[in-house]
Image: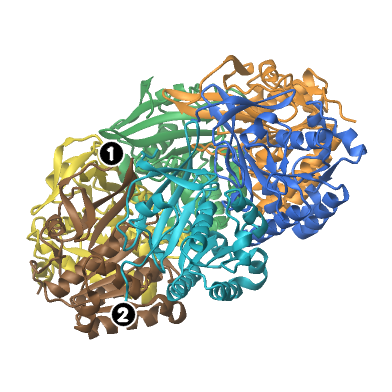
Chain colours: A cyan, B brown, C yellow, D blue, E green, F orange
Amino acid sequence: MVDVEDKVLTGISSLDKILGGGLNRGDTILVAGQPGAGKTTLGFEFLYSGATKYGENGAYITFVESVNKLKRDALKFGWDFEKLIKEKKIRFLDLIQVIGVKGVEANFSIMMNEIESVGAKRVVIDSLSAMTSYIETKAIARTFIGVLNKFLEKVGCTTFLLVEVPWGRSDIGSGFEEFLADGLIVLESTIDRFKVRRMLFVPKMRGCNHDLSCYDFFISTDGINVSPIPRARR
Amino acid sequence: MVDVEDKVLTGISSLDKILGGGLNRGDTILVAGQPGAGKTTLGFEFLYSGATKYGENGAYITFVESVNKLKRDALKFGWDFEKLIKEKKIRFLDLIQVIGVKGVEANFSIMMNEIESVGAKRVVIDSLSAMTSYIETKAIARTFIGVLNKFLEKVGCTTFLLVEVPWGRSDIGSGFEEFLADGLIVLESTIDRFKVRRMLFVPKMRGCNHDLSCYDFFISTDGINVSPIPRARR
Amino acid sequence: MVDVEDKVLTGISSLDKILGGGLNRGDTILVAGQPGAGKTTLGFEFLYSGATKYGENGAYITFVESVNKLKRDALKFGWDFEKLIKEKKIRFLDLIQVIGVKGVEANFSIMMNEIESVGAKRVVIDSLSAMTSYIETKAIARTFIGVLNKFLEKVGCTTFLLVEVPWGRSDIGSGFEEFLADGLIVLESTIDRFKVRRMLFVPKMRGCNHDLSCYDFFISTDGINVSPIPRARR
Amino acid sequence: MVDVEDKVLTGISSLDKILGGGLNRGDTILVAGQPGAGKTTLGFEFLYSGATKYGENGAYITFVESVNKLKRDALKFGWDFEKLIKEKKIRFLDLIQVIGVKGVEANFSIMMNEIESVGAKRVVIDSLSAMTSYIETKAIARTFIGVLNKFLEKVGCTTFLLVEVPWGRSDIGSGFEEFLADGLIVLESTIDRFKVRRMLFVPKMRGCNHDLSCYDFFISTDGINVSPIPRARR
Amino acid sequence: MVDVEDKVLTGISSLDKILGGGLNRGDTILVAGQPGAGKTTLGFEFLYSGATKYGENGAYITFVESVNKLKRDALKFGWDFEKLIKEKKIRFLDLIQVIGVKGVEANFSIMMNEIESVGAKRVVIDSLSAMTSYIETKAIARTFIGVLNKFLEKVGCTTFLLVEVPWGRSDIGSGFEEFLADGLIVLESTIDRFKVRRMLFVPKMRGCNHDLSCYDFFISTDGINVSPIPRARR
Amino acid sequence: MVDVEDKVLTGISSLDKILGGGLNRGDTILVAGQPGAGKTTLGFEFLYSGATKYGENGAYITFVESVNKLKRDALKFGWDFEKLIKEKKIRFLDLIQVIGVKGVEANFSIMMNEIESVGAKRVVIDSLSAMTSYIETKAIARTFIGVLNKFLEKVGCTTFLLVEVPWGRSDIGSGFEEFLADGLIVLESTIDRFKVRRMLFVPKMRGCNHDLSCYDFFISTDGINVSPIPRARR
């Protein structure tokens, strides 16, 4: 039985409005962006508001940045993950070194255990790009992501898969990841004449009546703020 | 003996008009589009109207999305595939995990059995890109698609092969798939100044007096609606 | 002894005029085009008018589309190839499955036998792209096409080699095929603001006083019609 | 315990202002630029002011230019590294030939020993591109940079990783390095009508309230001077 | 002892003027062009006028087109090579099939024998692209062309190496051939609004006071005619 | 001990002015350019004026053009290298065939011996592209160039490494060579409306107060003349 209106709020009300009322529970969403676009900040806010506002535990799985630095950066926004970790509401899982040694399959088990042990309903994987860079062929990566999606759907986790878009490029990953996910949020960080400009748009969100416009967004000490007025791109 | 006027209606009257009266029975049509372009929705509507309006059974074969999510997403449009499955009018076939384990040849047998067992006259394969990503060389993929086309023609199936066009690109697959199909429907999802814009055009439809114009289309709660007025692209 | 004025008419008078009076007998001509550009239709018209107007038998060799569908599509233009096959004026040769099993060399023998047995003076190979996709290296493909050209010249066959240009691209094949042929006819199918537009031009036709202008062309129920007035491209 | 306001000044006050008050201690910053963009000069100034103004020792690790030439070039700016080397405040480490012979792992040990022996708090690696060019796969390079970052964070080193952007290109490294670093400073050297123009912008600086504008900068006998007024790019 | 003013006239006076009075004896000149650009015609005219106007024997070495077709095409311009062959002034050498069987080294001996046996002072190799496509690596191709150049210089042959530029591209060969030759004549065949337009320019001609302008040229029944007035490109 | 003002004059006063007074002794400078851009001529003038005006012996090492042709071409400018060779002021070293047979390491020894035996203070290597094309991996090439630079610095040679930029492209070599050199002089040969236009700019020259503007230059019977007035590019 599928409940078509079981929505998960991201904690950023302007984004939830664009999404047509939030995310579908159990969906896997790609969050793609160039360096500095705000992917990590969006992941933080998603997890933090889950744990503090909506009573949903979360897990942040990093293949990229050390947990110490992540917590330090989050604290600048006033998001005290250390406290939530102690309250067993959030888990941070550092897989930077493990992956090189034990391989992706081992990580997969560790990830699943962590997600289940904390009873996570929200997961951020930082990043899909880092995780799949250890997988030999596209076919295997494709299978792997398929299996991961099934697991996350089964345990009712709504998941952000962060995707690294190299500076100066706009295509996403290896060209198939966006098709394996239920949705795609693009954070675009480009030079617009005088400065780096951040924009957000949602080209895909299955089963959602989502908004197709482009919006500027800003990162302030409160986190992410999406401008309510659509803006022209390029 | 070939009946030149045995047309298959897609269920979207505005599209059937562009196609010059519908599709030719037994043809294989590529439906290419970026993420969020509406390929799956087009596939749903094709199958759903086949089963409910034209008395034609159908099969949806997925290498990408779980059947549960597919049914959930379809239900938003009011298309109750669960009911049609119980009435043995539609089959959903999930080959996400099978393919990695058993290989493409095994899937091919499973696919053919499913298509024949439900007496499917309409098939959606979601996606050709996923399926061929498991095949080692272009030459083998080419042969494989050739054999598949022959089977589908023989059993009188009209088929949509969904093709994933990565975000930010506009070429299709490996550059040969569009030549192996009888027709090509392009769903284009691009940023047009202020928002993501969806357009549809039909550059190829063998043996059809099809329209060569470009049309905006919209996805509403009724499904796909193609604007009747041609629009300039780019 | 070479007869410099032994011209072969394509059956499309507007095209023959652009070619400077027709093709040279025994020449091999590339016909390159995107999907839906009209390559197959041009091939049909070349063979059909050969058999019905100029008393020249022909062979259509397909690695792509089934013979049944080809005949069905031709019939829409009123070209009854079934009849010509019975009169032993035309042969259709389906090599879709053979090539994967037996390799290109086997196909080559079959092709040569068919061409000689029907006394073909006109040949269409659909497509060079499909045929060479089974050949391992460019060097072998190059040798193979060289040998094929020699055979066709020796038996006095004028040949169209259809070349698949992927949608969204404009370069031809692997970048050497156009140099191995005596001529090159480009059918261009691109989006021109509001619709797909078809244009034709002839950048190369050895030993012909050919026209270098670009022309729109249309596919109607009569076949291909080339506009007599040159048009600007892009 | 993380001190969120432990800032490291680069020694270039205009740059520190753009960075929102300096760098975070222990962070790893990519400095990307085309040849002649000023990467080495920025590295020199960072180390020299560390040793002479802020009481922080430093290490310059080169895989590219000989130490003699580096010292000669620095002397043009009045930065007498020879003196600082004698005072055991700075180390120069030449790994040009070592790497080819002993491999990256050996260099890694040498680097860590040097950094620890001089008690370096500031490190410049010239260049990440050179260092990773000896690593076989992206996956290994990714692991290696991850381990290096952890070491540098642990010993409290703030590090500039110079990245070579080939002339005529604007993307960075292999497309993943910018995600493994805490920040990214882009030095852009392009032809702007009449001359080579140097610009600087900071698209990413984790945990910093950095400025997103683009600035011209100049290299004079004093070192790097960043214009205070944002400038349009391209 | 080097005679700095031993010039070889191409036979096309407008081209000789652009070249600053002709080619240097013993030089190897790349003639690069898209299909239909006129490379073969330029080669014909160079050899024909050598044999009939300047008393220099010549050799045309083909890896591409059959000798019969080449002679037929030349005859359209009134250039009767058959006659010159009988007078032992010209040799045509067909290496299309030989190369695949015996390899490049064997061809090299055959080529040298032919060139010496006819006492050729002018050579056309049609094409360098075809010849090098059989060579495994760029390094070997580079060595091979170096050796060939030395031989041709030693026997005092002035040589045109035809280079195939694929339709839709403008770079030349593998990117090194133009550096191994003494000169480069570019024949450009592009779509210029309404038609295919042919232009010629000479970016490189060592030891010649050559003209750097771009010129339209036309192929008429007299052969190649270069417009005397420079024209803007693109 | 480093002498910061030991400048080497190129012999082209307009260029020395752009370089901020000449080159630094012992530096390695890339001279990059398309075919016909004037790399060889610049190399000639550098060596010839070294031997005749500044009392510095030189060596010209060629992997590309025969020594005979090089001397012939130089003579057109009135530069009689034959005489300088007899006076033991200049060496020409032809490594075209050696490299294929004996490998790069053997060449390296030969090069070093030649440079030392003539007591060369100026070296031209024509070309780095040719030399490195024989080296298997980028990592090895990188090491090799590093070792070469160290040797040249040690013996006090100022060196021009000519780099071949293929026609129609503007990036340099494999993307790392420009970082291994102390300076980069770009000779740009492009089509500027009516003709091939030659421009020169210096994006990088370590330890020099060089000019960043772009200049037209001309090759006349006197050699290279750089226009004193900056010009806009593209």
Q: Position of residue E5 (x, y in %)?
A: 58, 22
- Secondary structure of the residue carrying tag 2 is helix
Q: Position of residue D17 (x, y in %)?
A: 64, 32
Task: Inspect the image, locate mark 1, and give the three-letter code of the amino acid beneath it.
Answer: Lys
Determine the image quadrant of residue E52.
top left
Residue E76: mark in rendering: 1
Which quarter of the figure is the N terminus of chain A placed in? Answer: bottom left
Q: Residue at x 29, y 57 (%)?
A: A209
- Secondary structure of the residue carrying tag 1 is loop
Q: Residue at x 43, y 56 (%)?
A: E96
Mark 2 to mark 1 CA distance (whole Å) = 59 Å
Is B166 situated left or right of A128 in this image?
Answer: left
Residue B111: mark in rendering: 2
Q: Position of residue B209 (x, y in %)?
A: 12, 56
Is C157 situated left or right of D42 in this image?
Answer: left
Q: Residue at x 85, y 30 (%)?
A: D80
Dot 2 alpha-carbon crowd within 10 angstroms: few under 14, some 14 to 19, many 20 or more = many
Q: Total label count? A: 2
Protein chain holding label 1: E
